[in-house]
Amino acid sequence: MRPEGYRVGVVGATGAVGSTILEVLAERSFPATEVIPFASGRSAGKRIPFEGGELEVRPLSDETIQGLDIVLSSAGGTVSAEWAPRLVEAGAVVIDNTSFWRMNEEVPLVISEVNPDAIEAHRGIVANPNCSTMQMAVAVKPILDAAGIERLVVSTYQSVSGTGNNAVRELREQARAVLDGDQPKAEVYPHQIAFNVLPQVETFKDGDDYTTEERKLMAETRKILGVGEELGISATCARVPVVVGHSESINVQTRDELSPERCRELLAGAPGITVIDDPGAGEYPLATEAAGRDDVLVGRVRRDPSHERCLNLWVVGDNLRKGAATNAVQLAELLHERKLVGVPV
């Protein structure tokens, strides 16, 4: 680390997650002496806001990546596959928000409140989990520690911002078209998303009835929690016409008896969780309430009447913040606190 701070790169800085990373870096006063935004060639030279001023977007090249200490990358798997190793070779630690590195055995997959010690094993790249995985793992970790978990059944209701700015634009354009009595155009998603629910997030691979998002949710959760196939996980992921905020219905089968009351206590005392659970008064987690917040919101904690060791939870999180940008910055903070960035100069 340089005496005054780090040179920090943000790859994909003009996208939904990248722009949120810049906001979070400023909000949390990360010790950076310089923040450098990177994006595709067509965005090079564009000026974007940061801490009351502006930063000029640069293209990725062998010259522009020199001298960086930490890079927070959210520019797609193809870009990450090519540039993450090159950034590491140039001397940076890369915190990558794509799916490309998450299941690599040599790359730690880390949530700051769940498995922070895993970051110690990094070899230049640290993976940031999928947004739906992130909030579920934060919510179930206190339960796992206290009572063990045998099985998770999760249904997600994911906002369009998880797909990016174009999806947000399409939702708004479709909503206006429907309200005006016009036929909406579907380009980002295979079907109209406005006033609709799509039981598909990402794609289906040949011969697989589960989407790539559902597969990620199942595999990443096991890696983060440090468990194997002994933890049964079943996932159904749906896209809903919400701009920001993923919601999840999670059924948790515990190894040991755990009452709803004790579960609420555990969750309320865990880092990164806010419990909102007074359904009779209309108080429970909402996507509109989660937007702009970093905590994962948990409520509707109740016994599953069909099984004595099952609880149902309703879990909501801001997919752009804790689901992506905030955790990435928290991982950068962990690297700083544990002196895991480069060699002191």
Image (cartoon, rainbow, N blue to C red):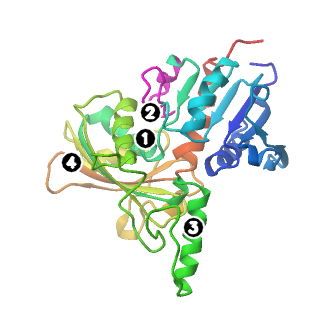
What kind of residue is marked 1? Val
What kind of residue is marked 2? Val
User: Which of the two discs, 1 and 2, labels the residue nearer the N terminus?
Assistant: 2
User: Which of the two discs, 4 and 2, labels the residue nearer the N terminus?
Assistant: 2
Question: What residue is at 46 percent from the left and 20 percent from the top?
Answer: 106
Q: What label does residue 170 carry, if any?
A: 3
Residue 156 placement: quadrant: bottom left
Instruction: In this rendered view, identify the residue nearer to me: 226 or 254.
Output: 226
Residue 312 drawn at (x, y percent): 28, 53
Q: Residue furthest right?
A: 53
Q: Is residue 75 left or right of residue 22?
A: left
Label 3 sits on a secondary structure element that is helix
Instruction: In this rendered view, identify the residue nearer to me: 306 or 274.
Output: 306
| Dots 3, 4 in contact, CB < 8 A | no
Q: What label does residue 114 carry, if any?
A: 2
Q: Which residues are magenta?
A: 102-120
What kind of residue is marked 3? Glu
User: Which of the two discs, 3 and 2, labels the residue nearer the N terminus?
Assistant: 2
Q: What label does residue 95 carry, if any?
A: none
User: Which of the two discs, 3 and 1, labels the residue nearer the N terminus?
Assistant: 1
Label 1 sits on a secondary structure element that is helix
| Dots 1, 2 in contact, CB < 8 A | yes
Does 119 appear above or below 254? above
Q: Main secondary structure of the magenta part?
A: loop
Question: What residue is at 28 percent from the left and 28 percent from the top?
Answer: 228
User: Which of the two discs, 3 and 4, labels the residue nearer the N terminus?
Assistant: 3
Q: Quadrant of the C terminus?
A: top right
How crowded pointer 1 is (Cα within 10 Å; few <14, some 14-19, many 20+) is rated as many
Q: What label does residue 138 carry, if any?
A: 1
